[in-house]
Image (cartoon, helix red, strand yellow):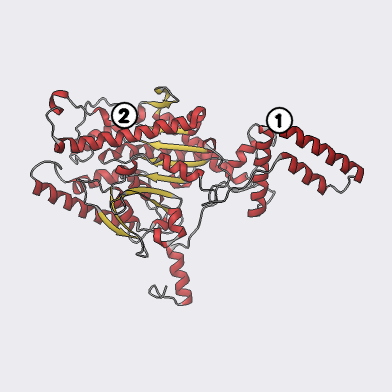
């Protein structure tokens, strides 16, 4: 739990400044004090919200300057002091990335991430720019959780392991190994064998991708959910918690394996924290949180230690990537009326996950209110010219399904962006998803540049000794891994 500081009032600040003035006479000071008392009485009768807010912002900046020891000399030329929003610019915006959960439809957000990273390179002029350089927090569920680990996991503590283009290619390369052929067809024994084979393949791929890394080995705060069968409750893997105690630090490959463990597709995973004290029996994150945007926003708003200046959603810049809402999956009444429980299993999971993700999108849009267009971007496929898709779209590894999804992803980027409107459903924006991502890339680069001229740090991430640094340090002092 974080401590909340009381707001300093404008009157208190005036009194403090009067005490510091050496040139004032006693009489002048007495008159000033009397005037302050009158002002205080007037303010108690008619409080000024604007004055109090401005005073709080100024004191927050000065306090952080005192705590962090920042110099008065900015690294680059700052904006004029009297420019509109200059105090707000000193707070900056916390940049959040959220990726929905899903299976093979993960190709869609993967393509969006690849385009965004390309735009960041172009607008920043840095050919080595990565997604992790411009986002402060990342949350992902299911395949989105794997993407989060790929984009923010690091072996050296400086650069991420994978590029954004690697994300969707991960699915296309490993589809048949993970999902087998025609999953869901054939007898019970065949389905069980396929599920077991897919689980073993997923384990192998995750181990090869993340090896010995744990949650601590991510560059920025990450949030990846699963559902814990042992406690019958959602479980959120968090870098911030891992840095607090080893009891919440888990191996990254197991975190990815857990969030993807969709029942009936992959086996549940029994996993323990690095120190062995916390055990979890995990199934897929989509059951608990198919759209983790709200969890990421809540994490930032209530984490004053790492994000000291955030006061509300107006201080956030959020990108939420969807999996393509159902993609016009067709359910004909004459057919579904004959379905039994086993026939409904896959379609019900698909409908539930997509409906939950859309509900979160609507709720987040309502929370942002009138600043939703400038602070919240949702990228989601709005139908497709490829026609109705199979209910098994997320588990179909066939080349035709992969090619279709790649085509849908490219079509999605060209579509007009669809916004959730406060109490008004959805509306089609004038900009395409391409244009929205281009605009967002510009905002991310601008925020990155502004941080060089702020008095206080916009973020204050918890740090850990990186594995490579720890090994070097241990060699210097002759400490073995067993002794540590």
Coordinates of residue 69 in the picture (x, y in percent): 66, 54
170 to 424, vertically: above or below: below
Residue plotted at (24% across, 52% down): 268
The local crowd at label 1, few if under 14, some if 14 to 19, many if 20 or more residues have their Cα within 10 Å, is few
Q: Is residue 479 above or below residue 73?
A: below
Q: Give the residue drawn at x 17%, y 24%.
A: 332
* Residue at x-position 57% and y-position 46%: 458
Residue 142 appears in which quarter of the rendering?
Answer: top left
- Decide which of 103, 407 is in the foreground and name it: 103
Numbered badge on residue 411: 2
Q: Is residue 331 left or right of residue 209?
A: left
Give the side of residue 222 with respect to residue 94, left or right: left
> Residue 3 in the image: x percent, y percent?
57, 51
Residue with the mark numbered 1? 46
Would residue 440 be seen by someone viewing this image from the given angle? yes
Tell me the SS state at disc 1.
loop
Contact, CB < 8 Å: mark 2 with mark 1? no
Determine if residue 129 is in view: no
Front residue of 220 and 61 = 61
- Secondary element at image label 2: helix
Is the residue 160 above or below the residue 332 in the image?
below
Quadrant housing residue 450: top right
366 or 31: which is nearer to us?
A: 31
**Residue 340 placement (x, y as % from top left):** 13, 34
Tag nearer the camera, 2 or 1: 1
Q: Which mark is residue 145?
A: none
Q: Pinpoint residue 54: horizontal percent, then vertical percent.
A: 67, 37
Looking at the image, the residue that sits furthest to the bottom is: 478
Q: Earlier in the sequence, mark 2 or mark 1?
A: 1
366 sits to left or right of 3: left
CA distance for labels 2 and 1: 56 Å
Count up the numbered dots: 2
């Amino acid at each position: 739990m974080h401590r909340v500081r009381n707001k300093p009032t404008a009157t208190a600040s005036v009194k403090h400044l009067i005490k510091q003035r050496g040139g004032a006479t006693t009489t002048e000071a007495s008159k000033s004090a009397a005037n302050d008392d009158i002002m205080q009485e007037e303010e108690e009768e008619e409080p000024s919200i604007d004055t109090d807010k401005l005073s709080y912002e100024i004191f927050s900046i000065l306090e952080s300057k005192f705590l962090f020891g920042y110099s008065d000399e900015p690294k680059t030329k700052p904006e004029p002091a009297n420019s509109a929003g200059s105090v707000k610019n000193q707070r900056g915006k916390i940049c959040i990335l959220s990726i929905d959960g899903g299976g093979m439809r993960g190709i869609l957000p993967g393509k969006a991430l690849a385009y965004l990273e390309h735009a960041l390179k172009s607008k920043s002029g840095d050919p080595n720019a990565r997604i992790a350089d411009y986002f402060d927090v990342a949350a992902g569920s299911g395949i989105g959780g794997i993407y989060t680990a790929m984009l923010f996991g690091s072996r050296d503590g400086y650069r991420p392991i994978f590029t954004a283009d690697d994300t969707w290619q991960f699915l296309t390369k490993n589809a048949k190994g993970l999902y087998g052929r025609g999953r869901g067809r054939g007898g019970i024994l065949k389905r069980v064998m396929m599920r077991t084979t897919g689980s073993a393949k997923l384990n192998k791929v995750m181990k090869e991708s993340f090896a010995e890394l744990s949650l601590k080995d991510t560059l920025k705060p990450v949030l990846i959910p699963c559902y814990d069968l042992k406690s019958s409750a959602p479980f959120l893997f968090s870098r911030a918690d891992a840095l607090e105690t080893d009891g919440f630090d888990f191996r990254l490959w197991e975190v990815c394996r857990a969030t993807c463990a969709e029942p009936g597709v992959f086996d549940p995973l029994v996993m323990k924290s690095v120190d062995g004290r916390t055990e979890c029996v995990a199934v897929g994150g989509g059951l608990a949180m198919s759209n983790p945007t709200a969890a990421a926003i809540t994490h930032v708003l209530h984490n004053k230690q790492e994000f000291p200046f955030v006061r509300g959603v107006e201080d956030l810049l959020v990108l939420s990537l969807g999996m393509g809402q159902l993609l016009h999956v067709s359910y004909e009444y004459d057919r579904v009326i004959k379905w039994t429980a086993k026939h409904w299993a896959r379609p019900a999971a698909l409908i539930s996950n997509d409906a939950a993700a859309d509900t979160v999108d609507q709720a987040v849009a309502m929370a942002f209110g009138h600043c939703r267009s400038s602070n919240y971007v949702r990228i989601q496929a709005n139908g497709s010219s490829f026609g109705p898709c199979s209910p098994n779209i997320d588990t179909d590894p066939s080349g035709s399904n992969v090619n279709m999804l790649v085509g849908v992803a490219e079509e999605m980027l060209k579509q007009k962006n669809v916004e959730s409107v406060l109490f008004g459903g959805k509306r089609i924006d004038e900009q395409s998803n391409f244009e929205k991502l281009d605009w967002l890339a510009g905002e991310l680069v601008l925020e990155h540049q502004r941080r060089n001229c702020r008095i206080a740090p916009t973020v204050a991430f918890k740090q850990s000794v990186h594995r490579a640094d720890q090994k070097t340090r241990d060699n210097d002092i002759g400490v073995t891994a067993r002794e540590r």
